[in-house]
Amino acid sequence: MISTRQPLKPPVVLAAETAADLMTPDPVTIRADATVLEAVRILGDRGISAAPVVDAAGRPVGVVSQTDIIIHARENASEPPAPEGPLRVARPEWHHPTRVRDIMTPAVFSCPEDAPVAEVVEYMPALAIHHLFVVNRAGALVGVISALDVLRKLKVGAASGRPT
């Protein structure tokens, strides 16, 4: 008789115990009072699609993403004024006084540094969030956990849940 059973594969385990083990420490942040142009430069220079927005005390107050910026630009688009006279050259420079706090997504999902990893991995998909802020006891941002951070900590390990 031929067996159709697949050979047992080693389990995949998460090589972390707390939120601090999963997080990317000291994330790029944007101040709530920064201009939209400053946010564009920060996101573009760092090659990231979103960043936590923090207040003066470093506490997270929201997230600003490329999508927030695109929506803002679309809703506030206008044609530059036509140059006057035949020899004038228009030099459009985008300067908009809008602040990040005016366009950010104000939802903040966070957990303490010592949050058990099991809660973190249940929390993120349950809330359909891609980033979870990690805060210290004072509420200041100390790290961010992304879905990619979780995937990076997956290891082929022993059944005990400990990585090999």
Image (cartoon, helix red, strand yellow):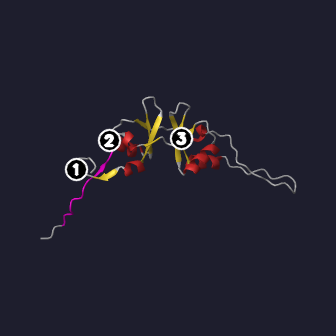
Horizontal and vertical percent position of residue 157: 26, 52
Horizontal and vertical percent position of residue 31: 57, 37
Front position in the image: 159 or 70: 159
Magenta stretch?
Answer: 4-17
Mark 1: amino acid:
Ala
Q: What element carries label 3?
A: loop
Kindly give the residue lying farthest to the front in the view shown: 164
Tell me the residue that label 2 is attached to: 17
Q: How crowded is mark 3: few (under 14 residues within 10 Å), some or many (20 or more)?
A: many
Question: Could one spot residue 75 in this view of the protein?
Answer: yes
The mark total stands at 3
Magenta portion: prevailing SS class: loop
Q: Dots 1 and 3: beta carbons under 8 Å? A: no
Give how far apart the Cα atoms at labels 2 and 3 are: 25 Å
Q: Which mark is residue 29?
A: 3
Q: Is mark 1 on a helix, strand or loop?
A: loop
144 is within the stretch colored magenta: no
